[in-house]
Image (cartoon, rainbow, N blue to C red):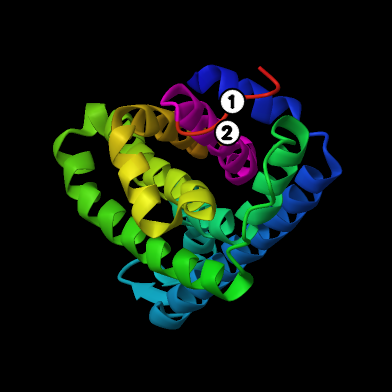
Amino acid sequence: MIFASVSRALSQLSDPRFRRVLALGVGLTVVLLVVVYAVFLWILNWLLPESVSLPWIGEITWINDLLSGASLLLMLVLSVFLMVPVASAFTSLFLDDVADAVEAAYYPDLTPAPRIGFLQGLKDSLGFMGVIVAVNLAALILYLIFAPMAPLIFIAVNGYLLGREYFQLIALRRLGPEGARRARKRNAGTIWLAGALMAAPLTVPLLNLLVPVVGAATFTHLYHRLESASGRRNPDPAR
């Protein structure tokens, strides 16, 4: 069920509506990462002296250049972790467009779902982004203690968080807050596994840019399949 949903999501990447959301997501992601790096570099340059005088060696003026170059490598590594809250934020902002495109192509029998709206999506995005950042900062302790298992811990933790966010927002459009919560609890294991499958590519530069769009589309299919399997909606007309 999960892999079939992913396959359908990938097959629709050529859809103009998907490409539009992907272009917006990539553009905003790049801008965000550049801003974060610029602020980090400014703080680094503000804290460090322009030169250092060492006994028997004299004045050294290239420390800032060396640390600036090292900071770029550091930000490339940190971008992997930054992509988790970024993916969550963009999911909330653009989920309606992706979900509408999926439902129009695969579930034409459905009536249009109420849209979340930009302001509500922005509020949800900022709130959940804060949760993800806080949880990942706390998980740094586990990464350090169980270093060999760090990739699996990263995928497990963020798979749970992203899966919960994706499914909740998709289900909310059709079931309302209480119905979405019940549906999420009924399918907690499947949602976690699907979220882990979305979290894994977040560690791969460039590939992680596809995750917000593919994730939203995947969970749209997964929601309808799970509800259909439980008898709570009509069978999938495209199956």
Q: Any magenta on residue 214? A: yes
- Residue at the spot 66% in from the left edge and 30% down from the top edge: 9
Residue type, label 1: Val
Sooner in the amino-acid sequence: mark 1 or mark 2: 1
- Relative to 119, residue 116 above or below: above
The local crowd at label 2, few if under 14, some if 14 to 19, many if 20 or more residues have their Cα within 10 Å, is many
- Relative to 225, residue 97 above or below: below
Q: Is residue 201 left or right of residue 160?
A: right
* Residue beneath disc 2: 218
* Residue beneath disc 1: 6
Q: Give the dominant element type of the magenta stretch: helix, strand or loop.
A: helix
Q: Are marks 1 and 2 in contact (CB under 8 Å)?
A: yes
- Residue at the spot 30% in from the left edge and 70% down from the top edge: 55
Identify the magenta region: 205-231
Residue 64: x and y, percent? 49, 69
Residue type, label 2: Thr
